[in-house]
Image: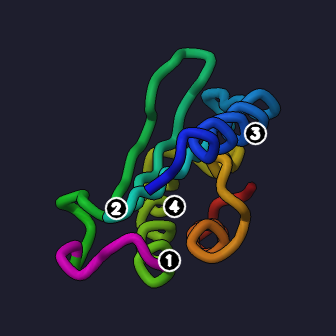
Amino acid sequence: MRTEKKQQLAQLRRWRVRKKISGTKDRPRMSVCFTNQNIHVQFIDDTAGRTLVAASTGSKSIPDREKLAANVKSAKAVGAFAAKAALDQGIKQVVFDRGGARYHGKVKALAEAAREAGLKF
């Protein structure tokens, strides 16, 4: 369980990352959120304020979703699935928003899987 100080520091990290990046229709922001049980990915056009494509471990269209959790193996699967969904919508380039998390472990696995599937960061 996080203490209040850790929550404040995590929020400051999110804000610090977020103020540097912004998504457009041509190059949306690929926002990643990790909970204790799920992984969520959204492709967001910040100029219009809308989500273009979304994917998560709970999506019904993802294969074998019952076996997925918030781990590195699932991050690879969700990253590849999200990239395929984005490419189907015509999104080829994105800005990666790691949400204040370090580029390590699950975040790195998800990003590399999306790159291998054809997205350009």
**Picture coordinates of residue 81, whole percent (x, y):** 41, 66
**Picture coordinates of residue 62, whole percent (x, y):** 27, 67
Closer to the chain start, of discs 2 and 3, is: 3
Closer to the chain start, of discs 2 and 1, is: 2
Disc 4 residue type (three-letter): Ala
* Res. 17 mark: 3
Disc 1 residue type (three-letter): Lys
Separation of disc 2 and disc 1 at Cα?
A: 13 Å
Q: Are marks 4 and 1 in contact (CB under 8 Å)?
A: no
Mark 4, secondary structure of its residue = helix
Mark 1, secondary structure of its residue = helix
**Mark 4 surroundings: few (<14), some (14-19) or many (≥20) residues within 10 A:** many
* On-image quarter of the N terminus: bottom left
Separation of disc 4 and disc 2 at Cα?
A: 17 Å
Q: Quadrant of residue 8?
A: top right
Disc 2 residue type (three-letter): Asn
Mark 2, secondary structure of its residue = loop
Separation of disc 4 and disc 3 at Cα?
A: 22 Å
Q: Nearer the viewer, mark 4 or mark 3?
A: 3
Closer to the chain start, of discs 4 and 3, is: 3
Q: Which residue is mark 4?
A: 83
Closer to the chain start, of discs 4 and 2, is: 2
Closer to the chain start, of discs 3 and 1, is: 3
* Magenta span of residues: 65-71
Residue at point 17% right, 76% down? 66
Q: Which residue is mark 2?
A: 38
Q: Nearer the viewer, mark 2 or mark 1?
A: 2
Residue at point 48% right, 71% down? 80
Disc 3 residue type (three-letter): Val
Q: Are marks 2 and 3 in contact (CB under 8 Å)?
A: no
**Mark 3 surroundings: few (<14), some (14-19) or many (≥20) residues within 10 A:** some
